[in-house]
Amino acid sequence: MKKILATALALSVVFATRAQEIPERKHDGYKPHGEKGMHHRRPGGMDFKQLNLTDAQKEQMKTQKESFRKQMDELKKNDNITVKEWKTRMENLRKEQKSGMEKILTDDQKKQLEKMKADQHSKMEGRRKQGAERMKQHLGLTDEQSSKLQQSRKETGDKIKSIRENKSLSDEKKREEMKEVMKKQKDQLKSVLTEEQLQKMKEQRHHGPHKGGKKPDMSKETI
């Protein structure tokens, strides 16, 4: 049943990947998550066209973006710092960018931006629920099974988040604890689903119908 547990994949992809061996130096092959294409996104991933920026604001935004890009380029070229130092400096740059953006926007625009963020979150939640319902129907889950799996996923996410934020743990210890958490979630999944449901999940991942030839990401269809 190795790697057929769809509800565990969402977390394993995000967290297990980050739990891989971290090079001591930035130039040892480490590429921070989200580095590629990061210059093409606004803070929070919002489309600022809806804010009706003035020409002056657009120019200020452009200047700020160019400054941020320049500083990021310089940071990426610095091969004499550790991954931890790289992350700290990158986070500080992003905070400065966010602060600078807030100074450019008016109070009304800030309120509109918060509304846009809330709307985006609502849409994501809607898609999540639709995906959960599709999986529930496909596997023939009972309400009790669905509830147990949802609770298991939430508990797993909370535990992994706590481990990652625990600064007293070494990277090696974090990897060990996260592996143990993921193992327990897989065991819980096996105890909740029937053999038939586990087999259906496996078949869906490898042979299910895909629109446009693209395999659906079952890991995002949270139960």
Image (cartoon, rainbow, N blue to C red):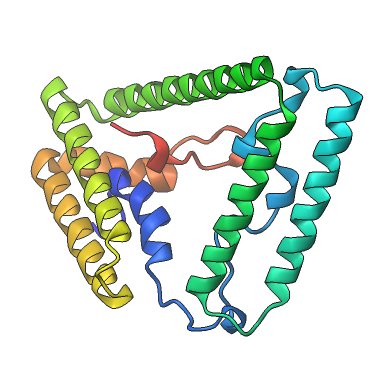
Residue 174 drawn at (x, y percent): 27, 68
140 and 88: which is toward the camera: 88
Query: In the visual, does 206 lie left or right of 7?
Result: right
At a point 83% along the width and 51% down the height, the residue shown is 66
Is 183 placed above or below 104 here? below
Give the answer, above or below, for where 188 lies relative to 57.
below
Query: What is the x, y in percent for residue 168?
Result: 25, 69
Say which quadrant the N terminus sits in.
Answer: bottom left
Residue found farthest to the left: 191
Say which quadrant the C terminus sits in. top left
Side of 11 relative to 53 (left or right)? left
Nearest the eye: 77 or 203: 77
Give left or right: position of 76 versus 23: right
Q: Is residue 92 above or below residue 104?
A: below
- The image shows residue 112, relative to residue 166, as above or below, that is above
Seen from the viewer's position, the closer of residues 117 and 140 is 117
Query: How many tags in the picture?
Result: 0
**Which of the pair 21/150 is nearer the observer?**
21
- Residue 148 falls left or right of residue 87: left
Residue positioned 19% across, 28% down in the render: 146
State which quadrant residue 36 falls in. Answer: bottom right
Q: Quadrant of residue 45?
A: top right
Q: Residue at x 85, y 45 (%)?
A: 63
